[in-house]
Image: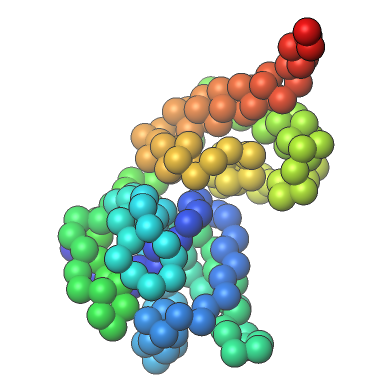
């Protein structure tokens, strides 16, 4: 059982997706300092189930993703970092939050690709891009519909889940997918529903 420093957030991190953070809260500055003194620049990211990112006392989901720091910088009193999602984990036990959140975790098996899912991947990518194009008409906070994904099919599946215009609770469900097929089926269904909802005609005004 590994002990991992933890960073609960109001968003979900998927494997193969980038994470940008502005760190200013003391407990996470301490966490970063500890990480930089060692040879392992990784921490865990879980979604906050209830509560706020700042101040502590939040309730957290138990499935998350390991984030590996790739870039660090300072600006205007905070630390900016860029990390990338790696593997998934489940929290076995939360430890003390002082000096920063930590947990005992166990790995979640990585997804294994089968070539028979290639057409499903193509259909899911089409559905995600369509939903992004439709959602962009209602919000400026979506990924571009022409965003590139990796050639590796498992990485592409996670990236499609990461850019899909869905909410964090749906994202947590995706993060728990037991197979690449399961992940793609769920992503496609969610994005098809979004496209259908956003393109539905307005009811007649009477």
Q: Which colour scheme is used?
A: rainbow
Residue 152 in which image quadrant:
top right
Q: Nearer the viewer, residue 45 or 150?
A: 45
**Residue that appears at 64% across and 39% down:** 165
**Residue that appears at 19% across and 56% down:** 92
Residue 87 in view, yes or no: no
Quadrant where the image shows the C terminus? top right
Residue 74 as seen in the image, left or right of residue 181: right
**Residue that appears at 76% across and 16% down:** 202
Residue 189 in view, yes or no: yes
Residue 167 as seen in the image, left or right of residue 139: left
Q: Nearer the viewer, residue 170 or 43?
A: 170
**Residue that appears at 51% across and 82% down:** 24
Looking at the picture, how far across and down is residue 130, in whole percent? 75, 29
Up-down: is 102 above or below 146? below
Looking at the picture, how far across and down is residue 12, in whole percent? 48, 52
Looking at the picture, how far across and down is residue 45, in whole percent? 41, 61
Residue 96 in which image quadrant:
bottom left
Quadrant where the image shows the N terminus? bottom left
Looking at the picture, how far across and down is residue 73, in whole percent? 62, 85
Up-down: is 199 above or below 27? above
Q: Nearer the viewer, residue 196 or 152?
A: 196
Residue 112 as seen in the image, left or right of residue 152: left
**Number of marks in picture:** 0
Up-down: is 125 above or below 156? above
């Amino acid at each position: 059982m590994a002990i991992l420093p933890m960073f609960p957030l109001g968003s979900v991190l998927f494997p193969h997706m980038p994470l940008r953070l502005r760190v200013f809260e003391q407990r996470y500055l301490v966490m970063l300092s500890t990480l930089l003194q060692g040879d392992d620049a990784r921490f865990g990211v879980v979604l906050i189930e209830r509560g706020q990112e700042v101040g502590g006392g939040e309730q957290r989901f138990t499935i998350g993703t390991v984030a590996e720091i790739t870039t660090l910088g300072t600006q205007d009193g905070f630390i900016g970092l860029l990390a990338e999602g790696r593997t998934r984990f489940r929290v076995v036990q939360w430890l003390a939050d002082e000096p920063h959140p930590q947990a005992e975790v166990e790995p979640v098996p990585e997804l294994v690709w089968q070539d028979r899912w290639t057409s499903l991947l193509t259909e899911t990518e089409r559905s995600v891009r369509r939903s992004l194009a439709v959602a962009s008409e209602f919000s400026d906070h979506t990924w571009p519909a022409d965003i590139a994904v990796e050639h590796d099919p498992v990485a592409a599946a996670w990236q499609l889940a990461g850019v899909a215009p869905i909410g964090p609770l749906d994202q947590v469900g995706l993060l728990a997918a037991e197979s690449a097929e399961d992940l793609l089926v769920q992503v496609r269904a969610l994005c098809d529903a979004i496209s259908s909802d956003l393109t539905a005609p307005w009811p007649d005004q009477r």
